[in-house]
Image (tube, rainbow, N blue to C red):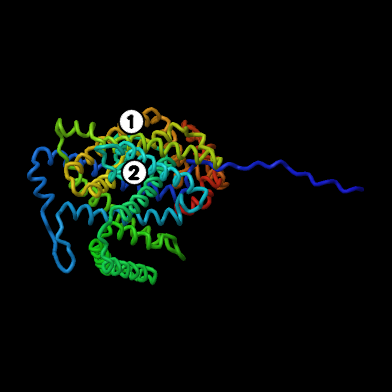
């Protein structure tokens, strides 16, 4: 008998899902991180409001405190004003946490694989490039100030989450994770911009010693040496040398954050990076960033000042960059990347949801205020107009995003309830156990019980695909991570 040719079954390429359900360990980490950032965002909003009132009601007192000098002048020039200590010192803690976040994203988060990293990275790059281009175009003519092109490029995750907390939005965890990853990549681009474009008068002896200190920091960490009493003084010395070198001091914070190990070894429940981040994040969100906002957001508000914000090229460029550049850059970049990579949007979400998050990404506060001061060092009046433009642009983005998110808030609430539903009370959401036979048996026994006749909306459906798919993480891995 002649052999029959092999029969080839038709194959289909499974499309990767975008904004699908997170794995349970990643979801738990995200919830813990965003809980702290949300509280910090509310404190940030409060500090900014206090700064505005203080600077306008008691301007002399505000300027006196802002310009009060503290610190030794030798051997390193650390006799700095309180405003500079907040800008160069406290923000280093913020960028230290950002460095740890970025390292963790590379080894365990959304950036660990090229396919998963592509969309948020493209979104972040487009969300930085388009605001800068729009600002440069608006300031290309006479009377323009091209040096401020980087001011509208950064997203402030704390401010954005503070807005979400105030408006009571139940934004699904996948959208929050996208916003967080976007902000982390934004921070990396921002610190590169600061290091390359806003550092001057480099003292190579100080920079060399700072690099030696960073190498010692890395060596001690890799050798498993513990003790805050050793690493905190070393970190301060590295920061002081970086400040003396002329490279912006916050670069030291990012560098040390990136050096921490963020993957688990052996029977570790937390990696050293995750442990340190858990300890330092409340200090960053609850103290460092709000105090910086207190010293940076105090700008004079008057009729002529507001008129200049809406008539001068630099402030207009900043506002257009935040509102139009960020929104179109993040949303358009994501849509294009999804189209060319054949990524499929989570069917329980719509592209309109991503558009609302893109508007939310236009809230630029902490890093934008910092770059605003660095961009116009010799023109305090223009720096104040730039700060006012950041505040106005961020406020407009927050209001528009609030309206857009409120339109879908009922649907978001249903998705969050579905994500959180735990009918068997074992501490693991049901959507992560739908393929677990033990969970299915428990639910069947529960259904047969006489008192189980209460309406409970039935078994939860998976958010973003069948439980166990690659997009959501394996159910057994998620359960192990929760325990």
In the image: residue 54, left or right of residue 159: left
In the image: residue 192, left or right of residue 390: right
Q: Position of residue 375 (x, y in %)?
A: 25, 47
Q: Position of residue 379 (x, y in %)?
A: 18, 45
Dividing the picture into quarters, in which one does residue 440 lie? top right
- Which residue, given by chain and number where applicable, does mark 1 sit on? 400
Kindly identify the residue that appears in the image at 44 percent across and 55 percent down.
106
Q: Earlier in the sequence, mark 2 or mark 1?
A: 2
Real-space CA distance between mark 2 and mark 1, rounded to the nearest whole angstrom: 19 Å
Q: Quadrant of the C terminus?
A: bottom left
Q: Position of residue 140 (x, y in %)?
A: 31, 39
Kindly identify the residue that appears in the image at 29 percent across and 37 percent down.
141
- Which residue, given by chain and number where applicable, does mark 2 sit on? 153
Which labelled disc corresponds to residue 257? none
Say if residue 165 shows up in the picture. Answer: no
How crowded pointer 1 is (Cα within 10 Å; few <14, some 14-19, many 20+) is rated as some
Say if residue 179 shows up in the picture. Answer: yes
Q: Position of residue 330 (x, y in %)?
A: 41, 39
Q: Residue furthest top?
A: 407
């Amino acid at each position: 008998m002649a052999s029959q040719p092999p029969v080839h079954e038709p194959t289909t390429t499974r499309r990767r899902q975008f904004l699908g359900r997170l794995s349970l360990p990643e979801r738990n980490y995200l919830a813990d991180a965003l809980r702290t950032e949300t509280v910090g965002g509310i404190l940030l909003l409060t500090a900014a409001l206090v700064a505005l009132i203080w600077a306008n009601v008691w301007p002399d007192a505000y300027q006196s405190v802002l310009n009060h000098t503290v610190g030794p002048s030798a051997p390193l020039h650390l006799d700095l004003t309180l405003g500079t200590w907040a800008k160069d010192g406290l923000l280093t803690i913020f960028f230290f946490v950002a460095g740890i976040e970025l390292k963790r994203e590379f080894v365990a988060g959304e950036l660990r694989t090229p396919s998963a990293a592509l969309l948020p990275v493209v979104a972040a790059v487009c969300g930085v490039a388009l605001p800068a281009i729009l600002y440069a175009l608006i300031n290309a003519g006479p009377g323009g100030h091209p040096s401020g092109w980087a001011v509208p490029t950064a997203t402030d995750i704390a401010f954005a989450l503070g807005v979400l907390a105030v408006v009571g939005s139940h934004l699904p965890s996948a959208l929050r994770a996208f916003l967080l990853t976007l902000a982390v990549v934004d921070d990396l681009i921002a610190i590169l911009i600061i290091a390359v474009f806003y550092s001057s008068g480099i003292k190579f002896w100080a920079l060399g010693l700072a690099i030696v200190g960073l190498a010692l920091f890395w060596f001690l960490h890799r050798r498993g040496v513990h003790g805050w009493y050793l690493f905190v003084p070393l970190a301060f010395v590295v920061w002081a040398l970086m400040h003396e070198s002329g490279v912006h001091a916050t670069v030291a914070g990012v560098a040390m954050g990136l050096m921490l190990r963020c993957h688990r070894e052996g029977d570790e429940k937390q990696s050293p990076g995750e442990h340190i981040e858990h300890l330092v994040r409340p200090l960053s969100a609850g103290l460092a960033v709000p105090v910086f906002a207190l010293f940076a957001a105090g700008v004079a508000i008057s009729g002529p000042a507001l008129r200049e914000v809406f008539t001068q090229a630099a402030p207009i460029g900043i506002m257009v960059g935040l509102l139009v550049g960020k929104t179109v850059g993040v949303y358009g970049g994501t849509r294009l990347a999804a189209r060319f990579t054949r990524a499929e949007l989570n069917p329980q979400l719509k592209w309109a949801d991503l558009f609302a998050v893109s508007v939310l990404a236009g809230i630029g506060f902490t890093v934008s205020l910092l770059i605003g001061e660095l961009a116009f060092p010799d023109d305090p009046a223009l720096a104040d107009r730039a700060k006012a433009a950041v505040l106005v642009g961020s406020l407009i983005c927050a209001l528009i995003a609030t309206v857009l998110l409120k339109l879908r808030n009922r649907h978001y609430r249903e998705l969050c309830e579905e994500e959180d539903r735990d009918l068997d009370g074992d501490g693991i959401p049901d959507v992560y156990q739908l393929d677990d036979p033990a969970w299915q048996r428990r639910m069947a026994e529960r259904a047969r019980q006489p008192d189980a006749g209460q309406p409970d909306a039935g078994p939860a459906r998976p958010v973003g695909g069948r439980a166990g798919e690659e997009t959501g993480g394996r159910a057994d891995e998620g359960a192990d991570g929760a325990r």
